[in-house]
Amino acid sequence: MIPRDFIFHQVNVQNRNEFFEHFSNLLEKKGFVKTGFASALKIREYDYPTGLPVPHGVAIPHTDGNFVQKDAIIVATFEHPILFHEMGGDEEDTVEVRVAFLLAVRDGKKHLEVLQKLILAVQNTAFIEEMLAADNQIELANIVEKEIGHYDETVSAKMEESK
């Protein structure tokens, strides 16, 4: 679900809205999302922030699957941290985010499964540090594929247990 050309190394954006616009446009041009995806991301992020206060700061922005035509995940490390509001925090709680996983997933059950996998992965500080230490996009893609693949079995097992 994470094509190598959707993994971006040291992106230079000034804020989360610029990040949302840039990558929503890319996803729309490639036929993955419908017009309005960026606006929906901004509204969802305002109502339900996705900044995670883990070492180095991570965000997992996402929105309603009605805007998604084909599933994808954009992975980006940032040249400079960008501010997100903290998930579950007060309005003044912010997180300086260095890594983001932008989700475009249609099906609600699959969306939950992907979120669970990513939340497990980003709690691994070594994984995030490896991502940030990557020298280029290819190295970053290898790190992401290795780590995210590791969580496929873990999440699938947890989903079966909850049935």
Image (spheres, helix red, strand yellow):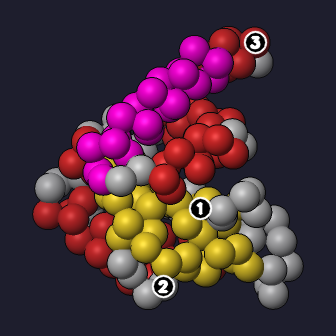
Give amino acid for label 3.
Glu
Give amino acid for label 1.
Ala
Give amino acid for label 2.
Asn
Looking at the picture, does residue 78 appear above or below residue 155?
below
Q: Which residue is mark 1?
A: 59
**Label for residue 15?**
2
Distance between the alpha carbons at the discs numbered 1 and 2 = 13 Å
Name the quadrant of the N terminus. top left
| Nearer-the-camera pick, 46 or 75 | 75
What kind of element bears circle 3? helix
| Nearer-the-camera pick, 119 or 69 | 119
| Nearer-the-camera pick, 65 or 147 | 147
Number of numbered markers: 3
Contact, mark 2 vs mark 3 (Cβ under 8 Å): no
**Label for residue 161?**
3
What are the residue bounds of the magenta stretch? 136-155
Distance between the alpha carbons at the discs numbered 3 and 1 = 27 Å
Q: Position of residue 73 (x, y in %)?
A: 39, 48
What kind of element bears circle 2? loop
Looking at the picture, does residue 132 appear above or below residue 119?
below
Q: Which label's residue is closer to the chain start, 3 or 1?
A: 1
Q: Residue at x 74, y 57 (%)?
A: 54
